[in-house]
Amino acid sequence: MELKTLKSFVAVATLRSFSAAAKELNTVQPAVSRHISQLENELGVKLFFRNSREVIITTSGERLLDDAIELLKHAKIAKENVVNTYKGEIGSLDIAYMGGATLSFIPDLVRQYAMQYPNIYINLVEMTASEQIIAFEQNKIDLGFSRTLPEKGSSDYASVGIYMDSLIAVVPSHHPFASREYISVSELQNETFVLFSRTEAVGIFDAVIQLCQDADFYPKVKNQPAQMQTLLTQVSAGIGVSIVPSSIRKLVTDGCKFIKIENIIPTIPLLLHHKKNQLSPSAAAFKKIVINAISNIQKTMAL
């Protein structure tokens, strides 16, 4: 059964007139008659009794009418769903983010997106950069906020720079340096360090090591936690000091004191990534909102 024949059938059955049905469907009466004949031949049953004065629907026609109305209703919904999905107005959106690096602005971005696209299901998942790469490969996320991706495989992704972060020292609140506003990296050469795992963020780890080497020492690294919140907990407990992106101040920092590093240049980027040629309409709409917000985000994240 074709949709056009079902539409003709429903119109005739509802209006009890071939001419009225043709007018409603913006067609000619012979076309409607042809559709009804085709449908009756296909089903092998009589759908209408008709004479010069009236059109009477048969019992078989009554049975078909309910089903035909439902079929046309579902066909309309299916069409609308396809069109709205293409426009990015329905569907789902999976976004990965790095906690401290995005907590200041990602709620506003998601709130703005949800207001514009209320029928999109948004799933936010906190992931490290390495976890995001695996999730991208498994098609579990559409977009990811993280640091620079490892050079290997990075050509498979498109990225938008959001803001540049600076490295900052963090010491226990009872540390002799805790009252300082600024510190030089060389003053930390005799300290024990807790550094964020290189496995999770190669760029940050290597930047910290390079900063120390530029100050003529190699840090004594005691622990390499895989979560920034764990790193801050260990610093607070007096296990060591650290050098971290300044955005980490947005996490729970009780017992920690952040100290600006003298003559530091912002070198730690936060980017929005997605796989090339795999940007869904819903993800593209969110990306547009992010791009429009970059200027305000940079002001928010300024040290």
Image (cartoon, rainbow, N blue to C red):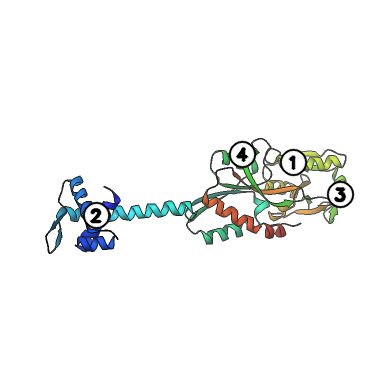
Tell which circle, 4 or 3, labels the residue nearer the N-terminal end. Answer: 4
- Foreground mark, 1 or 4? 4
> 159 left or right of 55?
right
Rendered image: mark on residue 205: 1
Distance of label 4 from label 3 (alpha carbons): 39 Å
Which residue corresponds to the image point at 66% horizontal and 48% vertical from the top-left? Answer: 271
> 214 left or right of 100?
right
Where residue 171 appears, x then y in whole percent?
79, 50
Residue at which label 3 appears: 184
Distance of label 3 from label 2 (alpha carbons): 87 Å
Front residue of 242 and 97: 97
Residue at which label 2 appears: 31
SS for callout 3 = loop
Task: Give amino acid for label 3.
Answer: Ser
Q: Residues within 10 Å of mark 4 (few under 14, many from 20)?
A: few
Residue 173 visible in the picture: no
Where residue 166 appears, x then y in whole percent?
77, 51
Task: Give amino acid for label 2.
Answer: Ala
Tell which circle, 1 or 4, labels the residue nearer the N-terminal end. Answer: 4
Where residue 279 appears, x then y in whole percent?
55, 47
> 26 left or right of 137?
left
Rendered image: mark on residue 130: none
Q: Are marks 3 and 2 in contact (CB under 8 Å)?
A: no
Rendered image: mark on residue 156: 4
Distance of label 2 from label 4 (alpha carbons): 54 Å
Where residue 50 appears, x then y in whole percent?
13, 58
Task: Give amino acid for label 1.
Answer: Phe
Task: Give amino acid for label 4.
Answer: Asp
Tell which circle, 3 or 2, labels the residue nearer the N-terminal end. Answer: 2
Tell which circle, 2 or 4, labels the residue nearer the N-terminal end. Answer: 2
Can you say whether 105 is above or below 272 in the image? below
Distance of label 1 from label 3 (alpha carbons): 18 Å
